[in-house]
Image: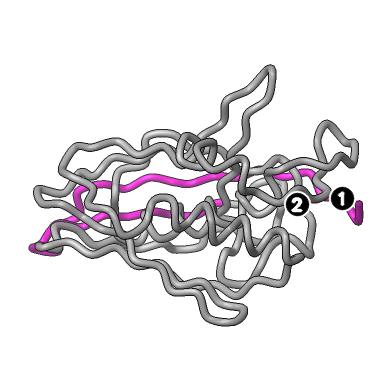
Amino acid sequence: MSTYYKTPPESIKNSHLVINSISNEIIYPWENISILENLLKHSSELEKSNILKDWEIIKWIWWGSCLASSIIYRTLLNAWVNIKSKKSHNIYYENIYWPSEIWLDSTIYEDEKYFVDLLFENNYNSPIILIPEFNNSRITLKVYAKNKDFSSKLTPINTTDISNITWKYEVFDKNNTLIKEEEIISKYDKIDSF
């Protein structure tokens, strides 16, 4: 999965840090990986920036973590790595989203009330490894495995009504037999600026 980003330098640094925290390490079959737990291990290295929280602008460390989480999520979907926990944003802001994401986003955060994580499990019968490439304004993340056990297909059903974005997600085995089909739905409130 590749994406361009147009975001402040703090966000870029944080995105690279989050993606690097889970990359270039062997992930064994049935091992679970928490993106938020990996991010928290590096929280002292994260840059603070403005974010919108409870409809208020605050300076916080999470800027850029959602960019990374969304790239990781889309990459895992494309490789059909099992997503155990994921939450979309609840607002849509035109300058946050980028063309290759097309509203298939993931947010992660922790505060006194919430622990929102992107949690995944290696459901392959062999180890996998995530390899990132950072090049100017592009992040590319790839999943490598000894055997390609699955393939997947995302088909847009509704991507124009932001209050009900819907995708059809299909997973196929090695013989191209459909083994899973579901709808991925995200709902957003639109804001003009912050």
Question: At 71% from the left edge and 50% from the top edge, which residue is drawn?
Answer: 63
Magenta span: helix, strand or loop, mainly?
Answer: strand
In this view, the residue in front, 163 or 71, is 71
Q: Which residue type does callout 1 highlight?
A: Ile
**Residue 57 horizontal side relative to residue 39, left or right:** right
Query: How much space separates mark 1 and mark 2, taking CA atoms?
Result: 6 Å
x, y percent for residue 64:
65, 54
Viewed as shown, does residue 53 lie left or right of 40? right
Q: Nearer the viewer, residue 87 or 52?
A: 52
Q: Quick one: quadrant of the N terminus?
A: bottom left
Marks 1,2: beta carbons within 8 A: yes
Is label 1 in a helix, a strand or a loop?
A: loop
Residue 12 sits in quarter: bottom right
Q: Which mark is residue 191?
A: 1
Left or right: where does residue 129 sit relative to residue 21? left
Left or right of residue 120: residue 36: right
Could you say which is closer to the camera, residue 46 or residue 103?
A: 46
Q: Circle 2 is placed at which residue position?
A: 92
Q: Position of residue 151 (x, y in %)?
A: 24, 62
In the image shown, does 141 or 87 lie closer to the viewer?
141
Q: Which span of residues is magenta-colored?
A: 166-194
Q: Which mark is residue 18?
A: none
Residue 122 point in image, percent of width and height? 24, 44
